[in-house]
Image: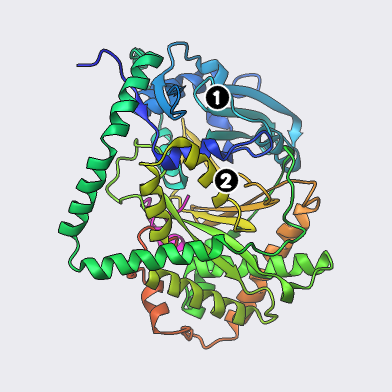
Amino acid sequence: MARYTYERLSAQDASFLFMERQRVHMHVAATAIYDARPLQTEEGGVDIVKFRKGIEAALHLIPRYRQKLKWIPYFNHPVWVDDRHFDLNYHVRHTALPRPGTEDQLKQLAARVMSLQLDRSKPMWEFWVVEGLSENRFAIISKVHHCMIDGMSGVDLATILMSTTPEYETPDVYQYMPRPAPSSLELFQNEAKRTISIPSQVVRSLREFREQSESVRTEVAKRANAIGGLLGYAISAPSETPLNGHISSHRMFDFMSMPIDEVKATRRAFGCTVNDLVLATVSGAVRSYLIRRRVDPKQIDFRVSAPVSVRSKDADPTELGNNVSSWIVRLPLGERDPVKRLESIHRVTSDLKRTEQALGVQMLMAAAEWAPSALLSLGSQATSGPVNMIVTNVPGPQVPLYMMGSKLLAMFPQVPLLENTGLGIALFSYDGTLYWGFNCDPSLVPDVGTFASMIQSAFDELKHAASLRPAIGKPLDEKAKLASTGSDSAAPGNSENVAETPTAEATLKSA
């Protein structure tokens, strides 16, 4: 038995490291606002000692948070090893806004935190505890590298650190015993053996595929079509827009929220999915923004990447890492009528589910497990090219949550920017509210607050149009009825009915 322990990063996890550049930071983040009273000190600040102890007591459930990267010589592939010098004080940071701190000041601080790259020589996460927010609140800006988590595993982590009741007793802290890490020579030898075994692994995988498939010809054709559709986007670039271009390392952050009841009512009136409604809202805002920047939207081929989780419902919530695919959706910016834009998007997403486009990314990631890291690095750079924007929609529980007794009041997500994308949109639903986060490069999008107001206006247009429909609501088509009831299973993990879920179980699965 080996005297050491390590875990090799999957191809998909490693791809987020290879995509990163000095200006392109691949960490996901969120700005959460809490009631400060349960954690308040006599002086009115946040009891950081109690907070750190609570985090430390939970770390044994998520060992990845005390692991760092080590690279395999020659093969240049990363592995996880325990950090013998782990220091919680480095990762849990304490700062303050000038009292009474405003939400605009919090947005500026979150943007600065987002613009700083994580240190790869340490476990790749940070919690910034921000006191001084007005109305007796404090905030936590969480920042985790994408190679550690995707959207769904990040939510599962939040359920570990938070509870559904305000009662809290500081648990016992388990002593941290770091496991020995392999030497560089041992890593090289193990990877060499793995490389030699790849041909037999490929044969074994093909045999399993043949045994598990009812119709090999049908399954092969389905996967070939998925790959073909993905490559079709890759060989043709989207249009250049004011939202796209050479990005800097600076970031600007804005956020907004809307009641889930309004989203649910509008979705039901049109008989579509929540994700259709979100994409139609984004489409309306992008159209208005381009017109404001004196660009004719009729001439624009604008594509968004909509991540789709393929994580199993039975997956261990403490198991981090990425298990995500994506859809590429063309937004109908040339259409003036908001309802027709929604109908167009609904037809596209229905077709994506029918053709299972998400299989294309899954197959490429599966094949990448056998590819050299140099090819994986080139592939990672290529995958960031054929889209103008990421729009990711992540579910949260529809019941109140508490962090060490402090109620979570709001959660605004931040998605990283890819090369050439100046704006990214992330959504998170929680306790009756849909929260929107807008992360941007101010050199490309200096007026992100204006764009956020256009999101609200675009949704209001759809909401108004929904109110003019019959009281019961006329579905777009029969397929929409199935999607609106959550009975569609063509695309596992598709971000659909988060607003319909009254319990803590998430039905929307995306990165």
Mark number for residue 120?
1
**What is the magenta segment's predominant secondary structure?**
loop
Q: Which mark is first along the chain, 1 or 2?
A: 1
In terms of image quadrants, where is residue 479? bottom left
Near-viewer residue (169 or 158): 158
Q: Return the residue found at the far right.
A: 294
Residue neighbourhood size for the residue with mark 2, other residues' Cα within 10 Å, grouped as few (<14), some (14–19), many (≥20): some
User: In what element is the residue under mark 2?
Assistant: helix
Near-viewer residue (185 or 302): 185
Q: Is residue 52 left or right of residue 464?
A: left
Q: Is residue 120 above or below residue 199?
A: above
Q: Is residue 460 left or right of residue 123?
A: right
Question: Which residues are the magenta region?
Answer: 496-511
Please state, as top left, top right, bottom left or bottom right, where the N terminus lies in the image.
top left
Query: Could you tell me if the residues under marks 2 and 1 are in contact, i.e. CB atoms within 8 Å?
Result: no
Q: Amino acid at mark 2?
A: Gln
Q: Is residue 309 visible?
A: no
Image point 65% across, 58% down: which residue? 388
Mark 2 to mark 1 CA distance (whole Å): 19 Å
Query: Percent x, y for residue 468?
Result: 60, 86
Q: Is residue 68 above or below residue 10?
A: above
Query: Percent x, y for residue 296?
Result: 78, 73
Image point 37% across, 21% down: which residue? 188
User: In what element is the residue under mark 1?
Assistant: loop
Query: Percent x, y for residue 268?
Result: 47, 76
Q: Is residue 111 left or right of residue 38?
A: right
Image point 43% across, 20% down: which residue? 56
Q: Is residue 502 magenta?
A: yes
Which residue carries the number 2 mark? Answer: 381
Q: Amino acid at mark 1?
A: Arg
Query: Percent x, y for residue 338?
Result: 64, 78
Q: Is residue 441 magenta?
A: no
